[in-house]
């Protein structure tokens, strides 16, 4: 296992800053996901950890040892790529065997004609076969060892790529969007398999993805990156329920959080859409933005109203899209009971509890809140 520390990592391409001073530590044995929109620098950061890309400044340490300038093979990290990077002319067995043969056999022993005749080669090959058999059983690919990559499905190729990484017994696994080429159903299945694999191996996993569902369902912690900056690091629950920046709140969650216009008053009170919340803060008076997750919207009662402009019935739940009267805004509410869907075009009242909101200032930073006493409330936002 390995602890990986990144200190002020900076990287630029052709004068454009891709990474702007990344600082954080990946703990021994944890599953951390680097998540963010395309172009935010997460894959570049992974390649810097792997040694495939040099940083302009900063330091990478593995188990407290600086590894800057050390070639990738000497870092003892295993990387699984988006394309799987399997050799098309080799069988599954031989693809997995490549790192073991490179490590255990000398250059002469690897020669196709002379190598098998050398003393000791047979014993080494026997050990390689035993190790591959054990890995194949873990990944349920034992029946596929004679097949070539072109004869495998996407999920099977992904398992082979993971197996090739596992046989190296690396300090950490680095994954660069390994599920992006799979269909939606198989991605869900492989998410569970990777999470279970991490629990069995108890090894450090660093996983790059733009898919928040992958990050939320598999990770011990999530590092949200945007524009080359590390915006927030926390557990999936912390990132979802307590975002420190409006960009994090809007990126994590599907459907995305509803953002409504609000105002902070001189006395610390907060209004949204003209109605007061049972909340107060110490922020400077002025405009703010109020976020409410779709599942926290209560349909049928409240001081606000809107017209149903779109319905998404997913079977187990539904999303109701409302055009808010007089505000020029649309809002999405999650409805758990699909037996009583509102009609298209119908007029609905809605509200939300004061503890359901996340308030952000004019530059998008989270505003700490406190619950106000009922006697100070101008008008409740939830009735």
Image: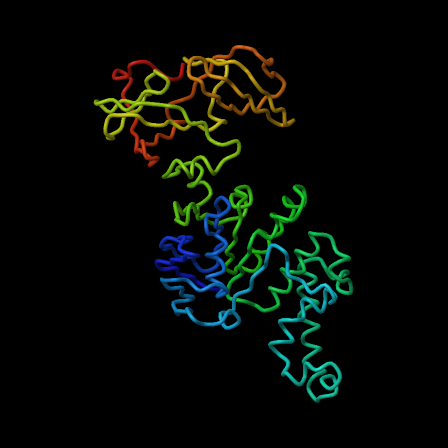
The answer to whether 160 appears left or right of 321 in the picture is: right
Above or below, 275 against 234 in this view is above
- Find residue 185 and report its horizontal and vertical position in percent: 67, 42
- Find residue 212 and report its horizontal and vertical position in percent: 52, 42
Q: Nearer the viewer, residue 329 or 16?
A: 16
> How many numbered markers are drawn?
0
Query: On the image, which quarter does residue 101 sit in?
Result: bottom right
Q: Which residue lies furthest to the front in this view?
A: 14
Q: Residue furthest bottom?
A: 119
Q: Residue furthest top?
A: 347
Query: On the image, which quarter does residue 5 sit in?
Result: bottom left
Above or below, 279 against 217 in this view is above
At x 53%, y 59%, the residue is 174
Above or below, 224 against 5 in this view is above
At x 62%, y 79%, the residue is 104
- Find residue 154 and report its horizontal and vertical position in percent: 70, 52
Q: Which of 31 and 147 is in front in this view?
A: 147
- Find residue 55 and report its horizontal and vertical position in percent: 41, 62
Quadrant showing the C terminus: top left
Query: On the image, which quarter does residue 139 sit in?
Result: bottom right
Q: How is the image coloured?
A: rainbow
At x 66%, y 85%, the residue is 108
Q: Nearer the viewer, residue 20 or 253?
A: 20
């Amino acid at each position: 296992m390995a602890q990986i520390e990144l200190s002020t990592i900076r990287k630029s391409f052709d004068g454009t800053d891709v990474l702007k001073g990344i600082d954080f530590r990946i703990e021994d044995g944890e599953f951390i996901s680097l998540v963010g929109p395309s172009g935010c620098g997460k894959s570049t950061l992974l390649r810097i950890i792997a040694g495939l890309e040099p940083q302009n400044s900063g330091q990478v340490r593995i188990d407290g040892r600086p590894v800057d300038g050390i070639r990738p093979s000497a870092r003892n990290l295993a990387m699984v790529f988006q394309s799987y990077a399997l050799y098309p002319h080799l069988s599954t067995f031989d693809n997995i065997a490549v790192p073991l043969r490179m490590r255990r056999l000398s250059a002469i022993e690897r020669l196709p004609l002379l190598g098998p005749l050398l003393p000791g080669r047979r014993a080494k090959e026997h050990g390689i076969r035993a190790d591959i058999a054990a890995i194949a059983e873990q990944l349920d690919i034992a029946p596929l060892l004679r097949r070539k990559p072109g004869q495998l499905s996407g999920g099977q190729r992904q398992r082979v790529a993971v197996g090739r990484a596992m046989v190296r017994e690396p300090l950490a696994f680095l994954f660069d969007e390994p599920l992006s080429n799979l269909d939606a159903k198989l991605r869900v299945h492989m998410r569970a398999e990777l999470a279970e694999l991490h629990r069995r191996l108890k090894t450090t996993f660093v996983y790059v993805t733009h898919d928040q569902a992958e990050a939320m369902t598999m990770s011990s912690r999530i590092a949200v990156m945007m524009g080359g900056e590390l915006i927030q690091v926390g557990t999936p629950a912390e990132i979802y329920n307590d975002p420190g920046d409006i960009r994090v709140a809007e990126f994590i969650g599907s459907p995305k959080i509803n953002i409504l216009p609000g105002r902070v008053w001189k006395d610390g009170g907060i209004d949204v859409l003209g109605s007061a919340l049972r909340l107060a803060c110490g922020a400077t008076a002025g405009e703010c933005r109020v976020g409410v997750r779709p599942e926290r919207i209560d349909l049928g009662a409240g001081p606000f109203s809107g017209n149903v402009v779109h319905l998404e019935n997913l079977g187990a739940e539904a999303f109701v899209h409302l055009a808010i009267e007089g505000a020029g805004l649309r809002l999405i509410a999650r409805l758990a009971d699909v037996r009583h869907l509102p009609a298209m075009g119908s007029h609905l009242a809605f509200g939300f509890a004061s503890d359901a909101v996340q308030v952000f200032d004019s530059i998008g930073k989270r505003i700490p809140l406190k619950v106000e006493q009922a006697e100070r409330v101008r008008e409740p936002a939830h009735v």
